[in-house]
Amino acid sequence: MRIRHKKWARPELEAASFYIKVPEEQKGNWKTCFKNQNHPIHLELGCGKGQFIAKLASENLNINYIAIDLIDAMLGLAKRNIEATYLEKKIQPENIAITRFDIERIPMILDKQDAIQRIYINFCNPWPRGKHRKKRLTHTRQLEKYKTFLAEGGEIFFKTDDEDLFRATLMYLEESGFEVYAKTQDLHQEDIFENNIETEHEKMFTEQGILIKALKARLRKECDEKWKKK
């Protein structure tokens, strides 16, 4: 999604207590970013305006969340949405951290010590042109990177409107040693997430009559053991 530059975004982000300015310094030690004793850490890749992560995190205070995006303007809006959601519930955003980083280089900021238990990928760019498909957040090349910091049995929750991307993602996951244990071609008829949080894109596509595809996958044990030995 393209978005206009917002000159207020960077100053507001740097003033926010839950914004991580230099994520590389947290590699292997993300748990120290949160003002609680929670152990699970979940991660959203490409958080956009933050409406999804704001609601998810504020409803699950026993889990810590990291949300990543590359664009300051997006993160600025995410920061405001997070603050508004937590303020409405009269709680502090102590279980969430947001940061700006290039997801293609994500092993630079996370490793096995961080033990990420779940990754959320919602409506990522489908990169339909063949030469660009390696840029997909669910491509085999990216999945191999995620395996360097996922906990044992770590999960990926994925949603898309794009049929080709959905089919390809099923193949990428199989190639990378993940087990797809739930999937649907119509999330709103078969809520495999049990309490689905609708994203901004999801609402838009649904109003256009486009079915939402979704899946849940987990890292196979034998594949995780292989990474532990590296």
Image: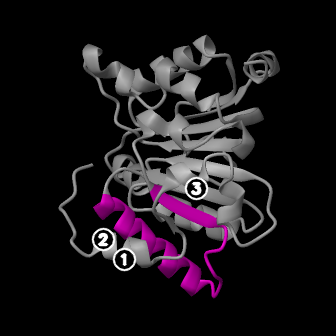
Label 3 crowd bin: few (<14), some (14–19), many (20+), radius 10 Å:
many
Vertical relation: 128 (above or below) 209: above
Q: Amino acid at mark 2?
A: Ala
Tags 3 and 2 in contact by the CB under 8 Å rule? no
> Could you say whether the residue bearing mark 1 is in a helix, strand or loop?
helix
Pointer 1 with pointer 3, Cβ within 8 A: no
Say whether marks 1 and 2 touch (CB < 8 Å): yes
Q: State the residue position of label 3.
A: 66
Q: Is residue 89 magenta?
A: yes
Nearer-N-terminus badge (1/3): 1
* Residue 164 numbered mark, or none: none
Crowdedness near tag 1: few (<14), some (14–19) or many (≥20) residues, C-alpha within 10 Å: some
Q: Residue at x 64, y 29 (%)?
A: 148
Could you tell me residue 85's position as x and y percent?
A: 53, 77
Residue at mark 2: 9
Q: Which residue is mark 1?
A: 12
Residue 160, visible in the rendered structure = no
* In the depicted structure, whether residue 84 falls above or below residue 32: below
- Which residue type does callout 1 highlight? Glu
Q: Position of residue 31 (x, y in %)?
A: 71, 58
Q: Magenta region: which residues?
A: 72-99
Asked if residue 85 shows in the view, the reply is yes
* Residue depicted at x 25% and y 19%: 129
Query: What is the CA distance from the residue labelled 1 to the residue labelled 3?
Result: 18 Å
Q: Is residue 14 above or below residue 26?
A: below
Residue 128 position within the rendered picture, expressed as x and y whole percent measured from the top left: 29, 23
Label 3 residue SS: strand
Spatial distance from mark 1 to mark 2, Cα to Cα? Answer: 5 Å
- Side (left or right) of 169 relative to 208: right
